[in-house]
Amino acid sequence: MNHRSHCHNCREMLVSQLITLGEEKKTFLNAYFDVREPEWFQMERMLTTYTEHVEQLLLGSDELLNSTVLIGSRITFEYVDFHTSDSFWIVMPEEADADESRISFLSPVGRQLLLARQGETRSVNIPAGSMRVRITDIQLQREPVTGKVEGGADYAL
């Protein structure tokens, strides 16, 4: 696939996300969260921030699409304190599959890494405590590859 059609496919995917997470946000949230819970409102704010960021990225060059962790990104990161690396996909909830290294953006780790920038170090809270990870690579793809990605969500995160 050439670079132009790849970028076009990624842009189509992001526009589809804007529809689902922007125009249909309340329906989406109600499918996963109880409107009476504070988490519903936290996620509503997060989705507003996310969709605004995606809108801005779509106005820019194709190179910007790999500058930030988005839904559909394959991210590679380094565990800062352990000098090891890992990678997985950030995906929509219905595409999540830990065995194939695809985690939902709604998961605790997915939420914490969404909108991270390449080179950024973040403290990620996990049940065992907090870990510092540095985003070393971001590749936005129309659809995650099938089969396992090296490393994965089963490891430390």
Image (cartoon, rainbow, N blue to C red):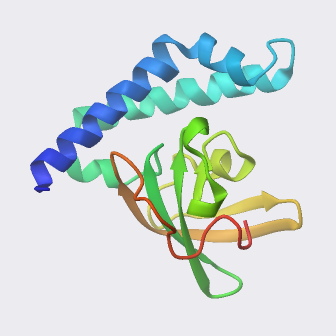
Q: Measured along the vertical axis of the image, is residue 54 above or below residue 22?
A: below
Q: Quadrant of residue 1?
A: bottom left
Residue 51 in the figure: left or right of residue 29: left
Mark count: 0
Question: For the C terminus, which image quadrant?
Answer: bottom right
Residue 15 in the figure: left or right of residue 3: right
Q: Quadrant of residue 155?
A: bottom right
Looking at this view, is 34 or 1 the one in front? 1
Q: Position of residue 118 (x, y in %)?
A: 44, 62
| Residue plotted at (34% across, 34% down) | 13
| Residue plotted at (65% across, 79% down) | 80
| Residue plotted at (43% across, 59% down) | 146
Q: Position of residue 110 (x, y in %)?
A: 64, 49
Looking at this view, is 69 or 152 the one in front? 152
Q: Measured along the vertical axis of the image, is residue 156 above or below residue 19?
A: below
Q: Measured along the vertical axis of the image, is residue 137 above or below residue 1?
A: below
Residue 87 in the figure: left or right of residue 157: left
Q: Check the image and name the residue furthest to the front.
A: 147
